[in-house]
Image (cartoon, rainbow, N blue to C red):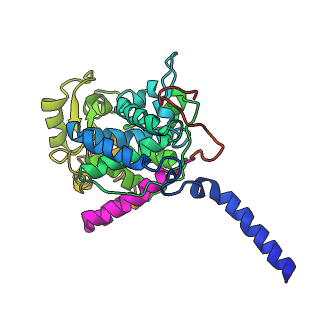
Amino acid sequence: MRCLTTVALSLSLFLVGLVGPIQAQLQMNFYANTCPNAEKIVQDFVSNHISNAPSLAAALLRMHFHDCFVRGCDGSVLINSTSGNAEKDAAPNLTVRGFGFIEAIKAVLEAQCPGIVSCADIIALASRDAIVFTGGPNWSVPTGRRDGRISNASEALANIPPPTSNFTNLQTLFANQGLDLKDLVLLSGAHTIGVSHCSSFTNRLYNFTGRGDQDPALDSEYAANLKSRKCPSLKDNTTIVEMDPGSRKTFDLSYYQLLLKRRGLFQSDSALTTNPTTLSNINQILKGSVEGFFSEFAKSMEKMGRINVKTGSSGVVRKQCSVANS
């Protein structure tokens, strides 16, 4: 019996070792002893500044997403490159905003607790706090992430789902990060706030298959409005457009309602309605309440925030978020 117990214990420890690293090493209030006010400093900075630039809430959430999809949630999206080959130099990140905002929070934390709070944790906390302060959902953010040293443009290009993605591409890129189809639908719901540049979707309006045609999956009336009032040219790289027209400042169910009307702005939005599982998930969300959506969105955000995190002796704590070496 003792032998069996020992074997069982050894096996259970082995299994924990297999599944534990990503899930177990983050913890709530990780900085309680080393920098007790860390989370309040982040929260106060966000609350004091987000009202001056409420659009940053969507931008910070996008930054968090883009960071986690490349080498895990390690703050590598923040690193500057002198040779133009860092993550922020890749096409998916050229329109990411909020780098200065995160660096400003880091400066406050460095003044209070030098070398303690990682840039990766700042992104995770600030993006959550910004969404909450603009009326969106709340979610738990366990901390203890460490920062990465490597930032590669080609990896960003390969791993961040582009707005031109079809369903197969979305499924693959999300599965690569340990996220399932339900997570795909819920995290796409972040498109209920914020804006996009015309260049992210004008191919749907003017040159969908390379023959000067329009995407037949896009509602024709919506497409005509986009052409006449928003993006009159395929070459427009500067105009910005609401992703959720009439509701871009409100975290609600409108995005999903628009999907069923064939008015999702991106090809990747439209793709969610082409698969029976994701279409079912959309309908289930719409049958429920906003509060129910918030709750489910929170679960997927918590899951995303744990992707391939560096903890313990892995990674570093960068003194400047934009500089790779600490």
Residue 271 visible in the picture = no
- Image point (25%, 23%), residue name: 236
Is residue 134 magenta-colored? no
Extreme residue in the bottom direction: 1
User: Taking 55 as reference, is 63 left or right?
Assistant: right
| Numbered range of the magenta stretch | 279-308
Extreme residue in the top direction: 83
User: Taking 169 as reference, is 131 left or right?
Assistant: left
- Image point (45%, 46%), residue name: 170
Is residue 282 magenta-colored? yes
Magenta segment, prevailing SS (helix, strand or loop): helix
Instruction: Determine whether 29 is above or below 42 in the image.
Output: below
Q: Quadrant of the C terminus?
A: top right
Residue 283 locus on image (x, y percent): 30, 63
Q: Quadrant of the N terminus?
A: bottom right
Q: Which is nearer the eye, 210 or 122?
A: 122
- Image point (47%, 27%), residue name: 322
User: Taking 213 as reference, is 28 left or right?
Assistant: right
Residue 122 locus on image (x, y percent): 43, 42
Q: Which is nearer the eye, 77 or 267?
A: 77
Instruction: Determine whether 265 is above or below 230 in the image.
Output: below
Residue 57 locus on image (x, y percent): 29, 42
Residue 272 locus on image (x, y percent): 36, 51
Residue 34 visible in the picture = yes
